[in-house]
Image (cartoon, rainbow, N blue to C red):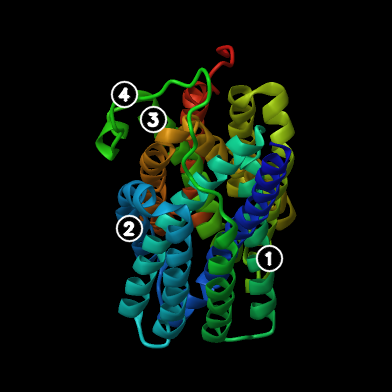
Amino acid sequence: MLEQTVRTDWALRKATRATYLVFGAAGFAFASWAARIPQVRDRLDLDSSALGLVLLSLAAGSVVSLPLSGSLIERFGSRRIVATMAVVLAGAMVGVALGCLVGVAPVVVALFVFGFANGAWDVGMNVQGAAVERGLGRSIMSRFHAGWSLGTVVGALIGAAMVALDVPVTAHLIGAALVVALVVPVATRSFVVDDHDPEPGDDVPDEPFGTADGWRERRTLLVGVFVLAFAFAEGAGNDWINVGMIDGYGQADAIGTLAFAAFLAAMTAGRWFGTALLDRRGRVPVVRVSAMVATVGVLVFAFGPGVWVAFGGVLLWGAGTALGFPVGMSAAADDPRRAAVRVSVVASIGYCAFLSGPPLIGFLAHRDSVRHALVVVAVLMVIAMLLAGFVRRPGDAPTA
């Protein structure tokens, strides 16, 4: 018995490290692309509205893959899905790198494939994160997402260096793709099995729980809308802080990339240290306060009088946005036997933010400015505050 416990603990430690690495690699891949959006825009000669439509293709790929990912993970396991999709995503990065030398069409196609692979990878690593969290018996999902954010910080800082050194977009993205394709498949070998035997007191379902069942659950759908609001806030920061700093505040490209990196750094810190707050205060009050902080940050960035005030707004925006998405994923995965389907449903709804966000903000920016267009994020944060009660952990007392 002792030997078996030691083996289990060792397997969980390996899986924890592997899950951190996979989350980090996903963030690194995304930020490597996002850090070069202004240069790709200039290379393709796109205005804000056209750029929004190009970014839409990435979100569209994710939205197509997300409803399918739950069934795929149940059939093949998160290990195979994450490893396969990482290689596909790396290939898509190479497609973007070469496509921007040719024209808009190949970039749109490559970004669609990027989004498709990213969506399934996202659900797979969250299902694995929930399995590890359950095995450890403590809250850790936010820290896995901090790993994602740390990966984005590394990717953004490298991107800033590439911009400052005038390294071509093509060379930068091909190098990042090679890192992803080599690291992730090796890391997934340490994943634990997704399914868990029911424990005493668990509510064991009498019938199979399929994708259609997940789409009929009121709580699951409302958690999805909650995640959508935070995903919109996060996606808007990823896509538009860089451009907003350059166009709205008249800063150089490198300063815009550093503002993007500051946003990601604030999210990373919020996710890493937010775990203690979640354990001490509970999910509901913490995410409500988080939404308020994000709202203030967005408004400061939109209406700030200067670049340093805008940087302060970026930090508040990132810190406030940090916990919403991982808390929503944990809420979807509270029941491990239904986690793959529910995470797939919640992620599908949440990723609609990435589908609607770029064209909506691009359209509003075309009519006014990128900075002022971002006010829509504050509206969605109010909706997140109203829905926060639905992410309550089973067994916790209701929060007013």
Left or right position of 143 against 105? right
From mark 1 to mark 2, how far is it between C-alphas?
A: 26 Å
Residue at the spot of label 2: 60
Residue at the spot of label 4: 206
Whether residue 248 is visible here, answered yes or no, is no
Question: Which tag, 2 or 4, sits closer to the chain's start?
Answer: 2
Q: Amino acid at mark 1?
A: Val
Classify 10 Å Cα crowding around label 4: few (below 14), some (14-19), many (20 and above). few
From mark 4 to mark 3, how far is it between C-alphas?
A: 19 Å
Classify 10 Å Cα crowding around label 3: few (below 14), some (14-19), many (20 and above). many
Residue at the spot of label 1: 154
Measuring from the top left, give residue 180's x and y in whole percent. 55, 71
Question: Which numbered marker is on residue 220?
Answer: 3
Is residue 65 or residue 173 the one in the foreground? 65
Question: Which tag, 4 or 1, sits closer to the chain's start?
Answer: 1
Residue 350, by quadrant, is top left
From mark 4 to mark 1, how far is it between C-alphas?
A: 46 Å
